[in-house]
Amino acid sequence: MSEPLFPVQYKVVPGGHTPRETIPAFATPHQRNDVQTGKGTDMTTRRALVLVLFALITVTSAGPAGAAETYRLGAILAMTGPNAFYGRVMSRGALQAVDEINAKGGVAGTKLELVIEDHKSQPKEGASGITKLIDIDKVPFVLTSFSAPSLAAYPIAAEHKVLMFNGGAWSPDLVGKPYVFNNRMVGDYLGQVITEHAFKQGARKLAMIYRNDPSGITVRDHVRPIWEKLGGTVVAVEVHELGATDYTAQLAKIKAARPDVIATWSYGKDIGFIVKQARDLGIAVPLIGIDWNPDGQTVAGATSDGFQYASDYLDLDSKDEWTQRFIQDYRKKYNEPPDFFVANYYEAVQILVQLMKDVKQKGGDWKSGEQLRQALLARHKFPSVYGGMIVFKDNGTSVKPVAIFEVKGGKSIVKTVVK
Amino acid sequence: MDYFIHIAIIITLYSILSTSYNLLIGYTGLFSIAHAAFYGIGAYTSALVALHFGASFPLALLAAVIVTALSGAAIGVPALRVRGDYLVVASFGFQMIVLGVMLNWLSLTRGEGGLTGIPRPELFGIKILTPAAYLPLAVATAALCFLVSWWVGRSPFGRVLKAIREDEVAAQSLGKDVVYFKIVVFALAGGLAAVAGSFYAHYVTFINPLSFTLEESIFIMAIVLVGGAGNLWGSLVGTVVLVVAPESLRFLKIPDTIAAPFRQILYGVLLVLFVRFRPQGLIGEHSSWHAAGDGPTGDGLARRDRAPAIAPSSEMRSGPAVRTSPAGAPLLTVHGIVKDFGGIRALDDLSLAFPEGRITGLIGPNGAGKTTAFNVITGFVEPDAGSVLYRGRELRGLKPSEIARLGIVRSFQDLRLFPRMTVLDNVRVALPGQRGERLLFTFLGALQSVRDDRRNLDRAYELLAFVGLVDRAREVAEDLSYAEQKLLALARLLATEADLLLLDEPASGLDPASIETLMALIRRLPEYGKTICVIEHNFDLIKELADPVVFLNQGRAIAAGTPDEIVTDSQLADLYFGV
Amino acid sequence: MLELLAQLTVNGLVSGSLFALLGISFGVILGTTRTFHFAHGVVYTSAAFAAYAFREGLGLPLWLAALLGVGTAVLLGVGIEVVVYQPLRRLYASPLTVLIASLGVLIIVENMMAIFFSTDAKVMSGFPSHVIIAGGVAFTLLHLGTVVVSWVLFGALWLYLHGTKTGKAMRAVASRPEMADVVGIDTRRVFIQAFAIGSALVAPAAILFTLDKGATPDMGVTAVLMASIAVIVGGMGSLPGAALGGLIIGLARNWGVWVVPSEWQSAIAFGILVVVIVFRPTGLFGAKLVKAEV
């Protein structure tokens, strides 16, 4: 797939992530208070400059516009920065759910309003974003993504008993924390699925290259004993820095170890580089992993053919009625199929709605994050947009369908579905 | 309210970072782009000490400051010995390495996953949990850090920093050990950044490498330059402006996909526009904002008209007062100096002697090696052979600053004043033996330091009175006329209290009246026990001024004698006037 | 094992050649104009994105897109010199000031490109992706091209500087800027020339890199960092030094995986930098270090 030359137009993100906008408000942008001008016309340049900057600030203290009674939920996503791609799809998923619910009259007559803060995948921005959401927008529920900003936001959320929901990249650090739940599959399980698959295909000598972070290491340590118990040997284990572009040195060492399968415990663009550079080094053995995305595909190009990975499985041809409706609606709006990130954030909002209903039914306060959490722990099982049910464990992780995909001509083809 | 308190706390953190960075770039002129790395080392050290050893917050903070100050010195030692470009690259590299360590030393830093569960600070048994409780602590700390920077900035130590920024070579020539000052200020700035790091870590309770990237370093730089380099108040203003403005973007209708790069572009545009059109920043270094009482004490003014205004020799260091050798014996001898510059022999077996208490004239055609001789004597150029003896002590191998402190200073043809420092500070910085130039002393001996400085102020005014520049004391040196600058250069030289002054064409480029003023001053110097060597092209001046006169040609002293002897030597005249 | 060593050496030669090209492009500007041209990084990026836009956006043939990429880089490089640096030099701004402006330009252009092109990786098609395997050592046609282009350009620069009148003028300005004025060389023009040549040299490096690994707006920062390390390791003011410095870094990064764990690979270049600054601050080929410029 080729990106358009000026993808800014392509990336039109629904404008719902500015504060206090009723969803779907992106069709009707408000006229906000204009910056107060005419204050210092005869000032020196310096003072004028200071004034302009401070005038910007006065907007901040303009105070909340009197909006209709809505239920606000928050999101801290990577709307910009190196991971803007994820922010884009995740926000679309959440917005689609909000729109759908509001179109049906909201939850018990109350419309939802989604407030998105950009964390740029930066921890400091994550902390600032969630503080603003909790303090100013008074949200009890926050969608989050990426481990670093999520972890920075977490203590603040826990302190205020605000429920966080992560459907993005998985990290072992986000497991076992009382106020965060993950509806993304855990990486070590995905790693297990794909290596077992490789073993069944006849591979015996495994080489691993993993991303040097807790998630990469967790998968590495989880997979190794499983592989050896199956009867295989691990012939090389190499590590790579985050965001490196040159992997040839590690791959040369892996090549010299003569494995018959190479596992990549990594994410994003990095895998694209690994795959391409492995092929450029004349390595012909299969490559497997637990993630694949458009950025990686762009980098790898034709060399991605045959790459196999295990991942959350959103069956685009599912017979499930809800799944189909979700996919059709998304296609209509964005002219492309949703990926599982879209589905996860869509699903998270749907779960919230269920929790709100549960709390309301018991006569509780649905604006209390703690009561939402209790409702979740009481229910455990929710209908999943993937079809069937999603089941949460007490440690905050969940189980749902997983599939093994193979990349062919730049497209991911489902090979097997693992239940 | 929490949100606004949060922003206020962020402002306090950045005010610490920007004021400390200002000490580097604004005061000392050191271009380091590793401030976020220091910030990060501080944050990580503090967090790790608290997590692993259960250390209390003050202890973790202290550890952070020490470790970061040491790493500041560690990067300084190799990089600061050499040219400025190296520091740029080395600090750039340091920034990247620190980030790399944070990302990859998993067993220590947990990589991108970062450190979680950093305990909130606890002071006097009270755990500080909410932002509202944190704010006073943060404000107090920021104020303390500001005070430290401010105090350092106006101390003799800070004056030397500015002198280094203005002209490193001139600072060396006045006896300042430039490398020492640079390393100390690096350690200091690092230590202060660590305070911000520690406060950040214990406030957010989570840190990971992404908070300490190159972009963060550039952001800190933008704050300092927009606010005004060399002025700490400017950094405070810059911090408020640059932290609050982007936060308010959260409330404006700018699409997020554009907002972040747009913000970076804004920083870039600010950097470029400010260095081009308002290099002094919002609040300039000499803005009236921070005008301090630098007038002379009553005592100094009273002495202003006392003649001779220059301090009598009894007030000077031992040298001239207690003569160790009979007048006229050589104070300094140069023997057999050879110096090649890439195949060209600049000095060829040069031997010279400067008799004590006399004015020796050095003449010769262009390229005869006169200035090179000065460079060799003062240690700026290492000779290939020969020796330089001062009071019987070999000077070869000593650093220029060491030689200056022994009592030999030189002037420069192009003056090398400290152009953006005041006339007063140009002189004051040159005064020898200032205890306040030691960083610890400025704090531990604060009272004495203030008293010393009072005395030095009076000394400086006396010297300015001697050259007739008292009225211009508060002006910036670059605003003086050329003649006044020459007088200031002389005053600065005298301030070092050196016994041997090497003057490189002191009269060049001056009108006759100014020459007369200057010559009158120089002629009086031997009265105060000074020994002088002067390079001069104007033969008439030399005749009036110097005895003996040495004639240099092609790197050799080919004749020496009284002015008359030299003038009447027809052979020399031919050489000199290039027949 | 021998095979691995050979493979690592080949990898090192390929990336080292690219670093060498970066090094001489940066070095020719630094040496001639004494400008620490941080914004060289975005000149590099601009070449990559221009070539990408012409190739993938307008569908031009690769050679033409590459040529236009070089042109864009030259325009931007010279533009920065004329619009930003020259006015500052006329104001007798300190090198520090020029450096800050340069850094400012770097972030401005980098983020403008992020807005126009987004931060997703951009790849360019059109170069045959053929893997050559010789005696167990594998490399692609592109890798071979990278090595050849880098060293041919180095040779061309060398001939230009030593064989032509304008080249000699540049060398004169580099070694004795104050004398150049005296003998009637128009330093302003020579500076523009240096920026043009440096920018023209960095463009192929960017395009080759993009063909191999794709372009992102932030690619320039690493590039200018590597370039400046190559120049210091080789010795300021020496072009063969800069080229050799680049080559050494490339080889060391690959051989280094024998001794240094892979996650520290990017620290190797800095390790070399520190060693050089401590033990041989003049660099491998540098002239004798002046203690201070009197």
Image: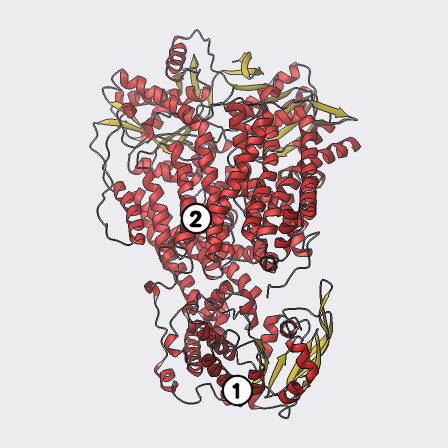
List the residue tagged with mark 2: B272
- x, y (%) of residue C261? 66, 39
Callout 2: helix, strand or loop? helix
Q: Is residue B47 visible?
A: no
Res. C11 image quadrant: top right
Q: Nearer the viewer, residue B270 or B517?
A: B517
- x, y (%) of residue B65? 49, 56
Q: Is residue B154 above or below residue B557?
A: above
Neighbour tally class for label 2: few under 14, some 14-19, many 20 plus, Cα within 10 Å: many
Between marks 2 and 1 in the image, the one whose residue lies nearer the viewer: 1
Q: Is residue B477 visible?
A: yes
Q: Going by the image, does C221 lie left or right of A146?
A: right
Residue kind at label 2, given as amino acid type: Val
Chain to which the residue tagged by mark 1 belongs: B
Tally the marks: 2
Q: Residue furthest top?
A: A319
- The colour scheme of the drawn protein is secondary structure
Mark 2 or mark 1: whose residue is earlier in sequence: 2
List the residue tagged with mark 1: B523
